Image (cartoon, helix red, strand yellow):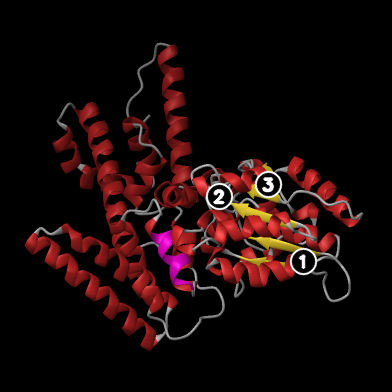
Amino acid sequence: MSELLIDKYFPKTFEEFIGNTEIVDDAIKWAESWQNNISQKPLLFFGPPGIGKTALAHLIAKKFEWQIFEMNSSDLRNKDTIERIAGAAVGNASLFGFKRLVLIDEIDSLQSSDRGGAGAIMSIIKNANNPIILTANEIYADKKLVPLRTLTQLKEFKKINYLSIARRLREICDIEKIVYDPEAIKELAKNSGGDFRSALIDVQNNSDDISLDNIKNIFPRTKKEKIFPLMTKIFKSQNLKEMQEMVFNSEVSSELLVKWVEENIPRQFDGEDTAKAFSILSRGDIFSGRIFRRQNYSFLKYVFFLSTVGVGLSRTKEYSGWRPFQFPNLLSSLSASTSKRSIRKEIGKKIGSKTHISIKDGVRDIPFIQVLIENKQIAPPIISFFDFDEKEIAFFLNTKDNTKKVKLLKESADEIKKQRLISLRKGKQSSLFS
């Protein structure tokens, strides 16, 4: 897939829009009033990112054939700029006499340094001759947004139900011919936290293996941190302010984020840009050394900035197409090692319990049990005797627990166990290999 799925499947009709149906209905009625020349208060959509606030505004404009005039937080620089651009858009009809929808995105990103931007927006709203929609993630945390709340109709977007997200993801996977496990899609949707846009990015990044095991192994350590949207911003964004805000306001730990960036530099950039990016990353590492030697943690801000925003801004060109992000190999290796140690310990417990030895001695005997399990004829009774599960069988055979070989061995072992229980009920003795 050379195209971002979030762009390709940006809702084109109301049928493709998922969640918040009541707000959709209210927005359509609001737009119909404007269409009939009945002025309405601007709409203020607020709620978590990725749930369709901007998408709904675009659908409204498309349905009523309105020209859309869009600004985001990076355009909200100062009072003069807003009055000159947005004021002209609000006060005049479009070229052919149709109404113009003014969309102002992310108004909660206005900073105190924006020199009167919020006041200018309020002035424009009061004199509006065209419909206005504003969006925000949070409207109650900043005092400067209080007047805006009184001048607008507030519409709070709720997180999208994971079943609705899963249904739409399955439709998209079928269209794109992406092989998937329906339960894995459901798990992915649950982990999205109601953020459909983020869930779609996750589908694209894991399109080669959308299995339940893969999703369960990856997402508890990634989705919670919302790492994919953050990586997209670092490697794709051209706006310093947006990039810096997302990096420094994210829930991702600095250590984890730096490892992700380091892993993906050569995957996202070509030769010269890769060299430049690693050069910037190494400068961040120099500050890490200074922190260690001097115990001066004031340098930490330089480490974080250089290793993330600095790397993103080091590129000399824009890269078209989609290049999937890779989980850091170092963390994968450590995770795999931890998982194997855990399985070895559980196997050691079972061996120790059955043979009356310590867990440590049970772990030591694993190679001998492995030789027995590699023998197809005696493997089932051995597995039955120690009550090994699929993961433990797969560990002995150095394969995955969902392979046909593992399942057949487990079924044979369970049948032996069943026959042993039947024999015991009849008062007969059952040997290990009976």
Taking the magenta stretch, the answer to whether it contains residue 240 is: yes
Pointer 3 or 1: first along the chain: 1
Task: Measure the C-alpha gap from mark 1 to mark 2.
Answer: 27 Å
- Is the residue under label 2 in contact with that under label 1 (CB below 8 Å)? no
Q: Is residue 340 visible?
A: yes
Percent coordinates x, y for residue 93 in the rendering = 83, 69
Percent coordinates x, y for residue 223 in the rendering = 46, 50
Q: Nearer the viewer, mark 1 or mark 2?
A: 1
Q: Is residue 172 visible?
A: no
Q: Which region is colored magenta?
A: 239-247
Which SS class for mark 1?
helix
Identify the residue at the far bottom of this view: 272
Q: How many marks?
A: 3
Instruction: Report the amino acid beneath label 1.
Output: Gly
- Is the residue under label 1 in contact with that under label 3 (CB below 8 Å)? no
The residue carrying mark 1 is 91
Instruction: Assess disc 2: are there few (<14), some (14-19) or many (≥20) residues with their C-alpha within 10 Å of its C-alpha.
Output: some
Mostly what secondary structure, the magenta segment? helix
79 and 97: which one is in front? 79
Taking the magenta stretch, the answer to whether it contains residue 365 is: no
151 and 409: which one is in front? 151
The residue carrying mark 3 is 151
Q: Quadrant of the C terminus?
A: top left
Q: Is residue 368 above or below residue 336?
A: above
Task: Measure the C-alpha gap from mark 2 to mark 3.
Answer: 18 Å
Instruction: Report the amino acid beneath label 3.
Output: Leu
Q: Quadrant of the N terminus?
A: bottom right
Pointer 2 or 3: first along the chain: 2
Identify the residue at the far right of this view: 36
Which SS class for mark 2?
loop
